[in-house]
Amino acid sequence: MQKLRKLPLGIQSFEYLRQNDYIYMDKTELIYKLASLGKAYFLSRPRRFGKSLLITTMEAYFLGKKELFKGLSIEHLEKDWLKYPVLKFSLAGGDFTSPKGLYNSLSHVLSNFEETYSLPSKEVSLPERFKDALKNAYKATGLRVIVLVDEYDNSLLKTVDYPEQEQKNREFFKGFFASLKDMDEYLHFVFFTGVTKFSKVSIFSDINQLTDISMDKAYSTICGITQDELEKNFIPEIEALSSEINLSKEECLNKLKQMYDGYKFSANGTNVYNPYSLLCAFNYKEFGSYWFESGTPTFLINKLKNVSYNIKNFTDNVEATALQMHDYRMDNPNPIPLLYQSGYLTIKSYDSEFETYTLSYPNDEVKYAFTESLAPYYLELPEDSTPFDIRVFGQAIKKGNIDEIINWLKGIFAILPYTNDRKTPESRFQDVIYMAFLMEGKYARTEVHSAKGRANCIVETDDYIYIFEFKVDGSVQEALNQIEQKGYAIPFSADKRKLFKIAVNFSTEERNIDAWKVG
């Protein structure tokens, strides 16, 4: 019987991982390159992408723990293996909504560092104490200090709904870490990680020596798993998953790619898989929305609600400049920077002439889970309403049951509130139609162009083809005539699947579908 391999789900300690024989995806060559070529860096990556594991790997490396790196690339690249003083701030946890929460977290780390290296501690402000710790550690060891800061932005993201405390956290954070600016002679290496890069209101205006490698091609794969890494290092797991769900190895790889690959963090970088979702799929031996289930994107939903952003814009590719993609501010009406930095959109291509990025959902996991999670908030469904259960709609689509499709849509319209002046009945109608067909998850195309015009929506399944034409306060016969006159069905004339031509009319007076007809 083949020995079961240990998947590092939920493990952020490199030392624990290596000591307990867990699978480790070797990124140490890139760590060595960072340490050799520069001094102070910032890396932004979405949550659950291995940032904390990267930080603890750096910590073990700079502490000279050579035994943990046996068999890894850095074992032979590093010759000295010096034991530097390491000051690591992990801000992934903490009660940052309380007045002293951030202060206590930073102070606790400093106290442990002072104790570890037997450093004196004076009754001074925390920033001054930070400076003293760097100077005294250098004097005590003869080596410059390593400063590692994990999830720097957590104290800001956790206080988005507490603006007064968020402002205090931001100012305190800036004042504390601005101390690094004048401490070059005592520092050997500095590394910050976070989900977002707060511009104009953050530490980056004061600590301007940080090199942002978030979109650097050379380090685009430092977090995440590449296709090559997947196929070389996870053969037993791929075979086990394939067997469990009765797919061939090739089909399984295609499904994994469709679900979890597609993240791209530089214009010409290599795509990577979400490591958390990939490991979960191997662990549970089934495909699921694991990354999304691990944390509800409340701050994203609130952001989209507050700025009234049209989620339908994500159907087509979104364009943004590099400056826009880095410009995350609390008051920025454009949510694209936050959606990109937090992993809900990713780079698909880059136009070097116009210096413009094209962004889209990275994969099916994000596209459908995000949309399904967002739908009740976006459509402003009442909390006590019937659930927005897309499965009912999907089953009707698969069975070719037109009556069930229409009844499901009518049921949603029946519970929609119409108190928001920004939403006209017509736009409400369009929103529901968009959400329904996007979330159904099949091969759906909206506004499909033909030589004579464009169909509102075409949906294809294994057995059926649906051509929808929607009218508002119009005629269903007029809609059917348009399908015929514009030749929307001609591309499918040789197709053996059953084809439905469906005309639907929405009444703004009744605020619901009042007529439909199948041609």
Image (spheres, grey):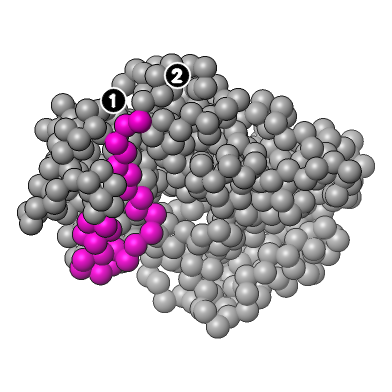
User: Which quadrant of the structure image shows residue 294?
Assistant: bottom right
Instruction: Indicate left or right for 450 with 346 as reference.
Output: right
Q: Is residue 104 magenta?
A: yes
Q: Residue at x 79, y 69 (%)?
A: 403
**Residue 88 in magenta?**
yes
Label 2 packing within 10 angstroms: few (<14), some (14-19), many (20+): some
Q: Position of residue 478 (x, y in %)?
A: 68, 56
Q: Amino acid at mark 1?
A: Lys
Residue at the (48%, 71%) spot, across then down? 380
In the picture provided, is 120 more to the left or to the right than 234?
A: left
Can residue 83 be seen in this snapshot?
Answer: yes
Say above or below: 476 vs 38: below
Query: Which residue is tagged 1?
Result: 39
Q: Earlier in the sequence, mark 1 or mark 2?
A: 1
Tell me if residue 55 comes above or below residue 172 in the rendering.
above
The span from disc 1 to disc 2 (Cα, nearest Å) is 16 Å
Give the quadrant of the N terminus. top right
Residue situated in front as seen by the camera: 4 or 509: 4
Q: Position of residue 314 (x, y in %)?
A: 51, 46
- Say what secondary structure mark 1 lies in: loop
Label 2 secondary element: loop
Question: Could you tell me if residue 482 is visible in this image?
Answer: no
User: Does 380 sit left or right of 503 as displayed?
Assistant: left
Q: Which numbered disc, 1 or 2, marks the residue closer to the eye? A: 2
**Quarter occupied by the C terminus:** bottom right
Q: Callout 1 environment at 10 Å: few (<14), some (14 to 19), or many (20+)? A: some
Magenta residue span: 83-109
Q: Residue furthest right?
A: 496
Q: Is residue 156 left or right of residue 391?
A: left
Identify the mark at residue 78; answer none if there is no mark: 2
> Residue sitting at 44 percent across and 27 percent down?
31
